[in-house]
Amino acid sequence: MARVPKVLLRGLLGLAVTPGAVTLDVLEGAGQDVGRSCILVSIGGKNIMLDCGMHMGFNDDRRFPDFSYITQQGRLTEFLDCVIISHFHLDHCGALPYMSEMVGYDGPIYMTHPTKAICPILLEDFRKITVDKKGETNFFTSQMIKDCMKKVVPLNLHQTVQVDDELEIKAYYAGHVLGAAMVQIKVGSESVVYTGDYNMTPDRHLGAAWIDKCRPDILISESTYATTIRDSKRCRERDFLKKVHETVERGGKVLIPVFALGRAQELCILLETFWERMNMKAPIYFSTGLTEKANHYYKLFITWTNQKIRKTFVQRNMFEFKHIKAFDRSYADNPGPMVVFATPGMLHAGQSLQIFKKWAGNEKNMIIMPGYCVQGTIGHKILNGQKKLEMENRQTLEVKLQVEYMSFSAHADAKGIMQLIRMAEPRNMLLVHGEAKKMEFLKDKIEQEFTINCFMPANGETTTVITNPSVPVDISLNLLKREMALGGPLPDPKKPRTMHGTLIMKDNSLRLVTPEQALKELGLNEHQLRFTCRVQLQDPHSDPDTLSRIYTHLKSVLKGYTIQHLPDGTVMVESIVIKVSSSAEEPNTKVLLLSWSYQDEDLGSFLSTLLKKGLPSGLSSM
Amino acid sequence: MAAHLKKRVYEEFSKVVQLPQEEAPAKKLRLTKPSKSAALHIDLCKASNPTDALQYLLHFARSSVEAESVEGVVRILLEHYYKEQDNSVRLKIASLIGLLSKTQNFNPESILDDTLNTFNTEKSHQVLAQLLDTLLVIGTQLPESLIVRHRLIEVAYKHLSDTYFGVRNKCLQLLGCLGNVDTPLNKDGQGLVPAVIGGSAPGVSGGVCVRDAQSLISDYFADQDPRVRTAAIKAMLQLHERGLKIQQTIYDQACQLLCDDYEQVRSAAVQMVWVLSQLYPESIVPIPSSNEQVRLVDDSFGKISHMVSDGSWVVRVQAAKTLGNMLQVSPHFLEQTLDKKLMSDLRRKRTAHERAKELYASGEFSSGRKWADDAPKEKVDTSAVNLIASGACGAFVHGLEDEMYEVRIAAVDALSALAQSSASFAEKCLDFLVDMFNDEIEEVRLQSIHVLRQISTNITLREDQLDTVLAVLEDSSRDIREALHELLCFTNVSTKECIQLALLELLKNLTKYPTDRNSVWKCLKFLGCRHPTLVLPLVPELLSTHPYFHTPEPDMDDPAYIAVLVLVFNAAQSCPTMTALFSDHTFRHYTYLRDSLSHLVPPLRLPGRTQAPGVSGIEGSGSVESAQLFLQQSLSRISTIHNLQDPGAQDLLNFTIRDLQRLGELQTELAGAADFSATYLRCQLLLTKALQEKLWTMAVPLCLKHNAMATAAAKQMLEETYKLEFLYSGLENRQVATIHHVRLQAKALQLVLTARTRRGVEPLISVCEKFLQEVESFQRLFVVELPHLQESFVGKLLDLSPKLSACKPGELVKILQTTLRQSGFLNLQLPKQVQRASATIIEPTGESDNPLRFTSGLVVALDIDATLEHVQDPHNTVKVQVLYPDGQYHVIQPKPGDFRSPGPHRHRLITQVYLSHSAWTEACQIEVRLLLAYSSSRLCKAVWSDSSTEGLQPAEGATEGTIPFGKPVKVFIMPKPARR
């Protein structure tokens, strides 16, 4: 389990063309820790909370994220634009009723349909354990869970949901557990992708995470397995099946302690299909509880499962198990082989422990631990090879049965994380939900491979990422038409093009208009700015001759410009005026007078340098 | 007589009349032409608004137009085209022109100018695109005309800069399909004029010809529209297909396109890169950001491998497939595709495969029970870990784990292709293939088993690998199990434990699925053959012999015991010391099995035992040749018979037929040829016997009752000829002619018999007509073979042919009778390989005494499992017949999906037939058999495959029928009346 860090994305997008920014506050647990996820993102002036998890390891206030970080008192509604929950695991949604009902939040909460369906079951179960069994007070009630779920807005995959005029979110498939999603959050041209927990390798009941090349400004990725590259899942599956098969053939019993949701379903499908394929007869039981309800939802949300289940559900829904039946306490004493899935997964209490006590004495039996066990639990002890366990009442239990460990984790490994980065091509990377030391390694790798910035904020730390948003500007039709009339190639959307105009920033909008219109709107007078320049020239001819020589010269040099020789003794190049005068003392030294307006600065300076070089000798004076 | 003559005259007259009738439709065509186009014209003029006009055009598109009138119609269409304001109508007209130009026998060149003119006025982009499409159609119709091609390309070039993507697309397509492929060098050896086809226009018309199509197209690789980019790559591939050598300079561009945002572009780019890698495999390309260089094929292999982890599954499939076609890649790169460095918490971890291998090498097998034996060992150097696999790293590891089974299958296929070309790679990919046996989709599992079989000549399975392979034997899918048996037949194993393991698992399989009996036995046969030395130490244990004690004699009917014996006997074949370990009953069982399962148990040289006479005759490698020789001798002996009326000819035929039949039984390789010859000879024998009947000398009225035998003979001969023709494969034209000849003889015989038994001439006339037609068609069919048939029945008949057609039936019969008697014996030339189609129904076995009960009126499904050998095109020819005791029968055509092809010339039919019947009082047997359907029209097609009249073959001339083949099987069924 991980603690939750908080990330605030604080958009600094002003009206100017200044670069924008996205800030992330890692609230609790999502930072360099695995436990509870809660991240605040500020983007384009919007504040979004990503996940609202709780820490399973604490029983006091530290259990929930520290919402006082957002506001000291009062409700959160005015500070948050929306809350997004990635999937139904308690470390991602456990604090939701606390936040919405006890702290106070009335805005929209977004989650996918399966998450919306399963989340309240888990929350209720969790509440029962804490309140009814441990007798805690000051905890959220069933009614609070119901009220909280009323605020939920369901999301579909790849559906773009407009939270308000500017903020939009879109969900992508994430694997991991049923209904897990990655979310893209977009304001204007700035975007953030939050992965939640995800899995890049498909398993027996879910597909692999997928995202399109959305090139977000930041990709916030979990990094639970930042330093692991896992072996192919086929080996693991084969091992698992082989062990179960051998034990059952020997006539032994197999106990598989699981948590009710997620991996349990995968293992069920795995065993179910294996039984089907191999024509096996030994019974498989699943200790009931919330599983039945959850299984019901698994049956319903077929679209969220993998290719095989989706394609075959018309003939047979894979979650309608033929071989797996509900477990009854009395079955544990039945003779003959059997396989039992029992909760909880760490063997610390409940049915799994009871069954374990009954079966531990027989070396024909086997226990398979499919997940991680916390220190201090019986699961942890037997995994470490302890042969004698001290139980309550001073009894000792001899462990003769075989103990196996099989890791069926549904998080992306280092390679998977890299693969996702390659898919999405983010501009910046942010790692959360992992251990600091491991993240360090991955961070280096990411920076090295993709040459993008990578951040790994600690809990409570704020990361600010400067973005480079494109700012839409309205252009006046007049200006556009004028620009078109000037000719040149047709506009190409892929190529930038320069144009002259005046940018008006007024009333929260940007407009590009002609200078004249701008002056008119602002009620200003137009000021003319002219440059003049004298160029001395050695030329023996008379003034008008010199002028006509200049005229011919310019005509030969500046092709494609309008050059006029005016009768009043001036040469006009576009709007630039050239006059010739000579002093009385030195008739050969002519002084050229150039005058141009500010707009013709380029041409004017070119002409002055050109004329400074003098006239070529071979010019005829008409 | 007079009446007959008159009829003939009428017939001839009516034939003469037919000729002008045939011309009549042509005339009609000419008449319809103006009316048709005129009608269209009127319709179009009538149309007051575009919608109406469109309706008329749509209606018009449905009717066909004759070649002669196409030009007129196009004119009218174009005339209207220029008048029309509405884009959609113009678009429809443009597409219609394209459609019309495809009309058969029409030369589209005549409308080319008119079509090109439309480009001058057209403003709408959509219509332009459609017009270009029309040009493409016209262009492809006229591939030879260089001028036309050049003009079309010019148009394409002009519109390449259009702003609408569709127009650019079509232009590129045009360039790809019609662009100049031949470099001038090939044409006249000068290489000076860059464009041969455009002698008129180099440089003048916008430089079309100065720049070749290739560089022109490659400019559009960077187009802003992904559809245009795709079209550009496709056009380039099209050029490649048409034989242009694409320049290597495109390679970089193509590689950049691999990272395109759009999947269709990436997918096409993968193909492009592959094509280039095949064209320039050995050229050297630099690796960016380093000074090193690699071969182009290796570089592209790395890049395509990278695409196996692409975001779009279409691209992934394409990439995985392509990898299988890159056989020139260097082994170093190839092996990287299976490489995946594992780590855990930054510590190097060994893969399960590596662990298994190590365990095996250290001699300590299995376990995995030790806690944390997969604990990571040495620390990984952080800088050396390459997370995002550059190059080929782990491409197949990803491909095989992909979410979509399409990708996984493509990856498995690619693995197979690569492994077949590289033994070391085959060794490496073994673990991965074995892992695929556990895939969730059966198709993938099956495919990987097949692939492993294909590469299994290159590899030896380790014990742990074999263990995984054998675990699949319990699979409930029969296909999987049989594929696995097939695989085990070809597998090499390394130790005797492996053999024991395999045997154990196979026996387990046998008890779990008894229907696999044959397949398991066959599998053990090969296993024994391949590993005699490994079986040897196991023999005492397998046969449970004991040095001192006699062990009880095992049950001979136990399939498991037979399986063990099959393994042992096959091993003993090449291991002479093994027989010493056998106990007495083993020898007895050997002789029994040798006889009952001769295809599974090989002949053994047993010490101190007299060998079965049947075995001694043909033994050793020379047996096939000697049998062949015997066959030849028998046939040449027959050829000494000149006339079937010779005394002793019948005896000789009788003996030879018997010899050949026996030979066929003994020598399976020659069974087809021997059976074929025997059947042929039997036909001849039947003919001879029929002709020697007394009835020929009897007066016509007397023989009415006596010809039963001759009629039966004629009928049987006919049937046999069909069997000869359709049951045997590998026949050449010569043999077919011979068979048809026999058939003619049989028909002649029938004709003669009819003439003798029937009174009156009327029925005879039509029969004679038919016979003459057949003679004629025989002559037509086998013109080439006629010289060989000089002396035969037909030869003689054809000599008389002018007379035949004129003579009356009575005379014809007489002629036939004498020719039949006098004609010589036609020798049979055996083709190189004759195989007899055969079928064996494996299931139902017909042994069950439990009747299949079902409610009458409803249906019951009966599973049928049969193997077919040497059947061509079984999907169309093989049918299942169900024969009920009351004589009712049904013929059922199995679905094409029910046929599998496990090997060459071998098919497997696994199907269900539905039975139904009204109620019976007690269980009764029905008969299920397989039929081979034939139709002579198919044969004609095959013979005349090169002639153009193929499609016009008269269907009424074809004879259709079925030949039963394979033994019928009886099944007990019991329809019960429904309870009310």
Image: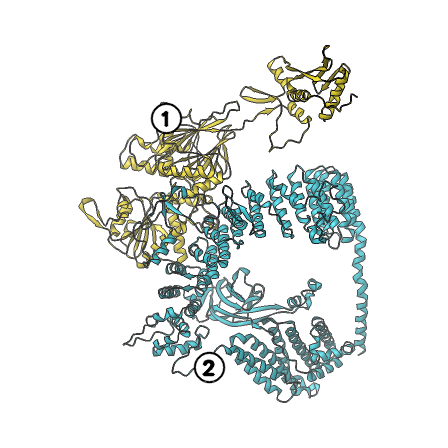
Chain colours: A yellow, B cyan
Question: Left or right: B791 with respect to B421?
Answer: right
> Is B120 placed above or below A514 here?
below
Label 2 neighbourhood size at 10 Å, few (<14), some (14-19), many (20+)?
Answer: few
Q: Nearer the viewer, mark 2 or mark 1?
A: 2
Secondary element under disc 2, as helix, strand or loop, is helix
Amino acid identity at mark 1: Tyr
* Residue B607 place in picture, x, y as percent: 38, 81
Secondary element under disc 1, as helix, strand or loop, is helix
Quadrant, the N terminus of chain B: bottom right
Which label is found at residue B616? 2
Which label is found at residue B415? none
Looking at this view, is A355 or A456 the one in front? A456
The chain that hosts pointer 2 is B
The chain that hosts pointer 1 is A
Amino acid identity at mark 2: Ser
* Residue B958 place in picture, x, y as percent: 66, 68
Residue A304, by quadrant, is: top left
- Residue marked by disc 1: A69
Task: Point out the residue furthest to the left here.
Answer: A394
> Is B359 placed above or below B393 here?
below
Q: Residue at x 39, y 49 (%)?
A: A231
* Whether residue B560 is visible: no
